[in-house]
Amino acid sequence: MNRTRLLGTVAATAALGLGLAACGGAAPATPAAPASAAPAADPNAATCDNLLKLDAVPTPDGDPSAPPDPEGNKTWGTAVLPLLTGAVATAPAEVKTPLSALQPVVQASATQGAPIPIDDPAVLENIAKYESWAYQNCGYQQVSVMGADYRFEGMPATLKSGPTAIQMMNHSAANQVHVMLIAKSPDPNLTVEQVVAMPMDQLMTQFQPLPGAVFAPPGQQGGLLVDLAPGTYFFLCPVGEEYGTAPHFLQGMINKVTVT
């Protein structure tokens, strides 16, 4: 979960076939089959759909040290507010509370251009709660990894396209934040070694980062909902300069993933 974005299980269905065998002699007339009951609607579908779209809204761009961008904040808040309101309207009780707590924050951005409170522990906690609920209840492809110093443990090499719920637990022994940023590769043949060797300005211009990121403080869990299109991606942690070190992805916290 990106700190600047407030507001990422493959759904397995089984078909049961029933074969009927006739005993000896002439087959009796087959009675009409009873009408099949319509499949039950997923009670979480509307909430999950809104949360998936919400996580895909790009946050205001810009240098964190630059002056606030009220118009960018308004644009973000205006896009997010109806999705958040829709999610709250259909959410079950266990996730309605954290989502409702985020509404005033988004409302302030939409109407006043207020900056997103990226360091508010309560905001981060409520985001983590709804991401965790979505991971468990939305029926999306699941990716669960552990962020360590400096690697993503448990990251698959391949994923299927479509809605995906990601969760990452931060087990940093150095007490450092870990982030998972997803960038689409311009070349499916690029290797991790080649990406790590690229100049930073080339990385910034050639790769297409997806909106949002997983953000996990030390000892805590973060999440993200993302609708992955087919292609080649690099999952990487850009954190590092804040701690006086090279970016974590240059130290090994980067994985190449093929989405089919």
Image: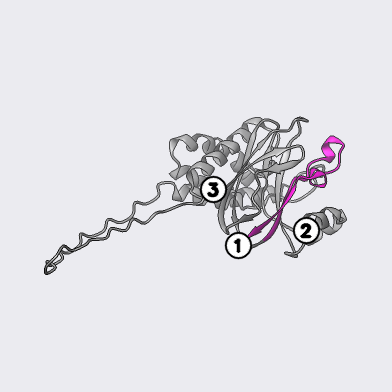
Does 255 appear in magenta?
Answer: yes
Give the residue at mark 1.
260
Q: Is residue 114 visible?
A: no
**Tag on residue 212?**
none
Label 2 to label 1: alpha-carbon separation: 18 Å
Q: What amino acid type is highlighted by mark number 2?
A: Thr
Task: State the SS at label 3.
Answer: helix
Q: Nearer the viewer, mark 1 or mark 3?
A: 1
Q: What amino acid type is highlighted by mark number 1?
A: Thr
Residue positioned 62% across, 63% down in the render? 230
Give the farthest residue toward the bottom. 26
Residue positioned 83% across, 35% down in the render? 243
- Give x and y (percent) for residue 69: 74, 47
Magenta part of the chain? 232-259
Residue nearest the observer in this picture, 189 or 237: 189
Q: Is residue 240 visible?
A: yes
**Tag on residue 51?**
3
Residue nearest the observer in this picture, 6 or 116: 6
The reply to whether callout 1 and callout 3 are in contact (CB within 8 Å) is no
Q: Residues within 10 Å of mark 1 (few under 14, many from 20)?
A: few
Q: Residues within 10 Å of mark 3 (few under 14, many from 20)?
A: many
* N-terminal label among 2 and 1: 2
| Residue 253 image-quadrant placement | top right
In the rendered structure, the answer to whether residue 114 lies left or right of residue 142 reads: right
Task: State the SS at label 2.
Answer: loop
Q: What amino acid type is highlighted by mark number 3?
A: Leu
In the rendered view, tell whether residue 61 sits above or below residue 25: above
Residue positioned 75% across, 64% down in the render? 189
Q: Which quadrant would the C terminus be assigned to in this image?
A: bottom right
